[in-house]
Amino acid sequence: MGYSTSIGVRGYRFADLRELMAKASPERSGDGLAGIAATSAEERWAARHVLAGLPLQRFVEEWLIEPDRDEVSALIAQQFDALAMAPVIGLSVGEFRDWLLSDAADAASLSALAPVLMPEMVAAVSKLMRNQDLVLVARKRRVVSRFRSTLGQAGVMAVRLQPNHPTDDARGIAASILDGLLLGCGDACIGINPAGDDPAGLARLWRLLDELITRHEIPTQSCVLAHLTRQIQAIEAGLPVDLVFQSIGGTAALNRSFGIDLALLREAHDAVRATGRGGEHAQRMYFETGQGSALSADAHHGVDQQTCEARAYAVARAFDPLLVNSVVGFIGPEYLYDGRQIIRAALEDHFCGKLLGLPMGVDVCYTTHAEADQDDMDILLTVIGAAGVNYIMGVPGADDVMLNYQSTSFHDALYLRRVLGLRPAPEFAAWLQAMGIADAGGLPLPDAPNAALTDLRALVDHAAPGAVCAARPDAAAGRGT
């Protein structure tokens, strides 16, 4: 089925829903590289005009990728529930936007829709929204998740402490962890992207993090972001695995390029649940995503990169995760060219993830060959904080020396908490106060704590010097595996 409209004397026709969605997308370099973007601002607005009048029901009738040839589409079809969608299924995409912005779309009604909304519907409505619309609606939707710390409540903004090291040196990692803890970071998790893939070296990282958390009774959770198969092996070997991590995508072909499928994700989910770590009701999965990954793997099927990203959230939704993170600017300017495109994509991802019921974090980041700088990231950090992001990254000096990209520092997290009146996760805030590191609001005390410093320094002093495992040549090629 085709779609058409005219602006003045000029007519526009879109062959199918896939083309209509791509042409309605805000400008970004990845869609241009794929050859599916609108060729002019006028064509983009023509596509949005048609999209605004499209019934949401059309997405049930016309699949962008048919379920019989893609297991992610099949999962989305499984998740859809026409009865639960009844309050909005009769709306057009434009009317859905109006409803989302109205007071009728409160926390309870958004929560009821989250398990059944199709990601393509959410991606479509985001294409009609201004940035402030994306902020306003996302802020309504609080998604709370729990392990040892409770994340996502109103007024709470957590931080993943990211102590990566180019050779997985234990003392270097421990020193970064100490730096982050003393600045109130680490309540989302302490997560290491390993430079190596040797099982013995990975085991030492898991034990290092477990010893730290156990010895100091820190109410947080650990993660070593190795490949899913390595994590399953670690669980089977009895290693202290809190969270299972995996990069995921919105098409089956993209997930195959990561070396996974839904069956392997289910196996990992079942394995980590069986450990019982974090308590009976703990959420134990951690996923990362990013616009452009499907195109980079030639796995997009002609679907625009933002819609592919939203489809990845259907995969995450199936596994009740503790953390989901859009690594928005990491993949590079081929997909998000400059600061403006990175900011827009981050707001879209956060909005879509929250509407689909996910505990969304955003890695406010860029690579040095993108047309972006730290001022762009300051704007994004502030706006995504106002939108109610669950967590951000905490990287020493904002410069990840293993993955070679620019993210947010521990001090950036302090800035955001101070400016917006946010605080760490409640259990973590209580621990910081008990240790004499921070005040009741989670902000560091002016004369940082001699007792806590002495105690925590033992972690660095006792960490075995040298590399935990040898760096692999492609360590900087991807954020997670």
Image (cartoon, rainbow, N blue to C red):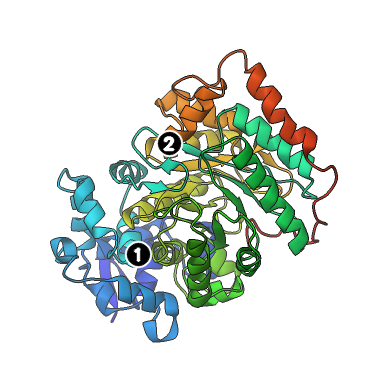
Helix, strand or loop status at disc 1: helix
Q: Residue at x 24, y 52 (%)?
A: 110
Give coordinates of residue 78: x percent, y percent.
31, 76
Identity, as a three-letter code, of the amino acid under mark 1: Pro
Helix, strand or loop status at disc 2: helix
Give coordinates of residue 390: x percent, y percent.
43, 43
Give coordinates of residue 277: x percent, y percent.
51, 54
Q: Is residue 347 above or below residue 88?
A: above
Q: Residue at x 44, y 21 (%)?
A: 440
Q: Are marks 1 and 2 in contact (CB under 8 Å)?
A: no
Q: Which residue is mark 1?
A: 119
Q: Residue at x 43, y 40 (%)?
A: 384
Q: Nearer the viewer, residue 341 or 141?
A: 141
Specify few, some or many for label 2: CA neighbours under 10 Å numbering under 14, 14-19, or 20 or more.
many
**Residue furthest out toward the top:** 447
Q: Nearer the viewer, residue 70 or 97?
A: 70
Give coordinates of residue 276: x percent, y percent.
48, 57
**Residue furthest out toward the bottom:** 68
Q: Which residue is mark 2?
A: 385
Picture quadrant of residue 234:
bottom right
Q: Earlier in the sequence, mark 1 or mark 2?
A: 1
